[in-house]
Image (cartoon, rainbow, N blue to C red):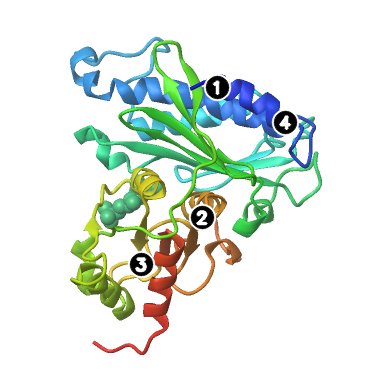
């Protein structure tokens, strides 16, 4: 095999000219996310050592007490984006309101806003299971140089300029799209460099894995219950395999590589679903579609939903195209129980 190994840095430079807007702003933004990802990765990797190393109320070099990793990740991503003067606004799962950078720096002329879930699935950290960061990037709709407004964040997913995730797994990977396919980069931790390891990722059309929290089964809509029964039926290439990590990024990443479907439907417990439209579902939906998969709320396209609030929840069905379409057909079929 003879191909040149490409780093993420090289890839960003090489592809910069293919972006619609070539000021370099988006490239610099993705570079900043790459940097923050490495910092957070380092911290996540030694999570299990905190109790060992952080004895007797130890404080870190900045003199801060040890903090929870999701709070740490939130601070690192925000700090990096603010310090490098790279965006005009940030919204995060960890922050109730969006942050307007113009209010801090009047000269800010940046045109991008970032929406981020800094450490998704963080309940998995205590048990050494993969977690992830999810990010979504839009061009602001209000004029540059003015403080960002809520409408800069409440845009349909189909307006995303870029989206991606970092998976802190057995290997750490950064996977992203700028609307021209999906590329995955694996971190070499010894030298802190991401290498292009998964060029042009492709969602298999069909799959045999279904990922859902089946503990909520009795609370699901009838169409979802029927689909789960269908997955378990002895017929054709079924029963399918059930795989549920409980960490969206990891479940999605596996399904995109192997072929499968992820479901977090509405339920009597979570009438609007659990996952957040703006910084969980939309970016994952953009990646899914760019890789040839599909993302739906059970009947309509996720990326066509007009958001009404920052932390809005939505029912989420995402994966191999024919599997998602199957769920949609179950959802609109006459509801027999
Ligand atoms: P979080 O943002 O509080 O971490 O919740 C999101 C996570 C997803 O990563 C995961 O897919 C889902 O919640 C799991 O939920 P549940 O434990 O209800 O199955
Ligand atoms: Mg989350």
Circle on res. 3:
1
In the displayed image of the protein, which residue is found farthest to the front? Answer: 1
Numbered tag placed on residue 265 in the rendering: 3
User: Tag 4's secondary structure?
Assistant: helix
Residue for point 35% across, 62% down: 264
* Image disc number at residue 285: 2
Tell me where residue 92 appears, x and y as whole percent.
Answer: 51, 43
Q: Nearer the viewer, mark 1 or mark 2?
A: 1
In this rendering, position of residue 198 left or right of residue 172 = right
- Which tag is nearer the camera, tag 4 or tag 1? 1
Q: Nearer the viewer, residue 244 or 91?
A: 244
**Disc assigned to residue 16:** 4
Q: Position of residue 319 (x, y in %)?
A: 42, 57
Mark 1 or mark 3, which is nearer to you?
A: 1
Secondary element under disc 2, as helix, strand or loop, is helix
| Contact (Cβ within 8 Å) of mark 2 with mark 3 | no
The quarter of the picture where residue 72 lies is top left
User: Disc 4 and disc 2: Cα gap in Å?
Assistant: 23 Å
| Residue in view at x 23 percent, y 57 percent | 241
4 or 1: tag closer to the N-terminus: 1
Q: Residue at x 27, y 77 (%)?
A: 226
Question: Mark 2 or mark 3, which is nearer to you?
Answer: 2
221 in relation to 12, above or below? below
Q: Earlier in the sequence, mark 2 or mark 3?
A: 3
Q: Quadrant of residue 155?
A: bottom right
Q: Position of residue 193 (x, y in %)?
A: 49, 17
Distance from the alpha carbon under mark 4 to that under mark 1: 21 Å
Say whether disc 1 or disc 2 marks the residue closer to the N-terminus: 1
Marks 2 and 3, how far apart at CA: 15 Å
């Amino acid at each position: 095999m003879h191909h040149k190994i490409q780093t993420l840095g090289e890839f960003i430079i090489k592809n910069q000219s293919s972006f619609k807007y070539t000021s370099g702003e988006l490239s610099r933004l993705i570079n900043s996310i790459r940097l923050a990802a490495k910092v957070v990765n380092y911290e996540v990797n030694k999570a299990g050592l905190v109790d060992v190393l952080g004895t007797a109320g130890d404080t870190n070099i900045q003199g801060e007490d040890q903090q929870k990793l999701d709070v740490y990740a939130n601070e690192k991503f925000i700090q990096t984006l603010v310090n490098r003067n790279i965006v005009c606004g940030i919204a995060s799962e960890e922050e109730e309101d969006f942050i307007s950078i113009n209010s801090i720096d009047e000269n800010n002329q940046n045109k991008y806003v970032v929406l981020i879930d800094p450490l998704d699935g963080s309940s998995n950290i205590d048990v050494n299971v993969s977690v992830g960061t999810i990010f979504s990037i839009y061009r602001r709709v209000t004029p540059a140089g003015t403080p960002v407004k809520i409408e800069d964040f409440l845009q349909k997913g189909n307006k995303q300029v870029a989206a991606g995730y970092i998976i802190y797994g057995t290997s750490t990977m950064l996977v992203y799209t700028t609307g021209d396919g999906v590329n995955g980069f694996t971190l070499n931790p010894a030298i802190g460099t991401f290498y292009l390891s998964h060029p042009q990722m492709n969602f298999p059309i069909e799959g045999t894995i279904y990922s859902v929290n089946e503990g909520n089964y009795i609370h699901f809509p009838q169409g979802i219950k029927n689909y789960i029964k269908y997955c378990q039926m002895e017929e054709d290439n079924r029963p399918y395999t059930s795989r549920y990590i409980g960490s969206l990024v990891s479940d999605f990443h596996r399904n995109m590589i192997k072929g499968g479907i992820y479901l977090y439907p509405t339920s009597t417990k979570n009438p609007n679903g659990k996952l957040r439209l703006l910084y969980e579902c939309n970016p994952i939906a953009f990646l899914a579609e760019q890789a040839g998969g599909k993302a739906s709320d059970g009947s309509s396209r996720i990326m066509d939903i007009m958001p009404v609030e920052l932390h809005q929840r939505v029912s989420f069905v995402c994966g191999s195209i024919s599997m998602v379409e199957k769920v949609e057909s179950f959802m609109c079929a006459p509801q027999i129980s």
